[in-house]
Amino acid sequence: MDFSDRSNGEYDLVIGADGISSTVRRLSLSATPPVYSGHLAWRSIAPIRPGGLTSLQFWLGDGCFFGLCPVGDGRTYGFGNVTGPRLQDPVQGRLGRLRDRFAKFGGLVQEYLASLDQDEQIHCGPIEWLELDEWRSGRVVLIGDAAHASSPMIGQGGCMAMEDAVVLAEVLSSAHSIESALDAYVEGRRPRVGWVRQQSRAVGESVSLPARTRDAALRERGGQMFRQRFTPLLAAP
């Protein structure tokens, strides 16, 4: 294997854990780019807990939502999501546009947005997923978003990557060959990853439903849908 610093080496196994824009994937398996999901996200972290926030909360609008999640050191992670065509949102003026876009949302969202004071605090990007049939080629294997990136709508991307690593380590330690270990890893992980991808896509599609239809379904069956979506993930990978 040759590297960009002109060094080289020989290895028994190469693991591509380099994310949705994986170079390992492009060089060894597929140059197919990720697919735009139809959603744009504005993400940021503010140094406050609006209204004494203690748990993840969502506010739903027409074709959009805003979420707040407490994180460490008294800070809060905020994310605004909008359905629409893919676009580039320039950094200059980004905070003002974000505030305008969610100006009709409630007090906690406004308190959060008011605590931001720089355009550079906000990351804006498309939500993408990856349609990839193969996760390995010979002794090159992909894990995490490099193999099966999905939208973050049920918050499992990082979890799936960590589970991949655990399962791959387990099969490598017990299989009689690297090839059989990689086969076992791919076969074992596909059902669980497929469930997460399916459910993430379903949640994303629900955001685009008419608000009256979506909100009525959530009021009637929201708790049940939540349990059905996550209960299969309680079992060990």
Image: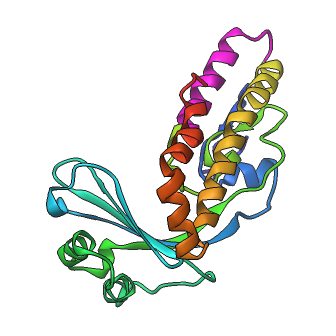
Q: Decide whether the magenta segment is chiefly helix, strand or loop.
A: helix
**The N terminus - image quarter:** top right
Residue 166: within the magenta? yes
As rendered, which of 31 and 193 lies closer to the eye?
193
Give, as a single range, the part of the protein colored magenta.
160-177
Expressed as whole percent of the image width and height from the top left, the position of residue 208 reads 60, 73
Whether residue 6 is visible to the viewer of this picture, yes or no, is: no
Classify 92 as above or below 189.
below
Q: Is residue 92 above or below residue 44?
A: below
Residue 166 occupies which quadrant of the picture?
A: top right
Residue 134 highlighted magenta (yes or no): no
Q: Is residue 208 above or below residue 157?
A: below
Q: Is residue 206 visible?
A: yes
Location of residue 59 in the rendering, given as x and y in whole percent from the top left corner: 38, 67
User: Is residue 187 left or right of 44 when viewed as pictured?
Assistant: right
Q: Is residue 59 above or below residue 91?
A: above
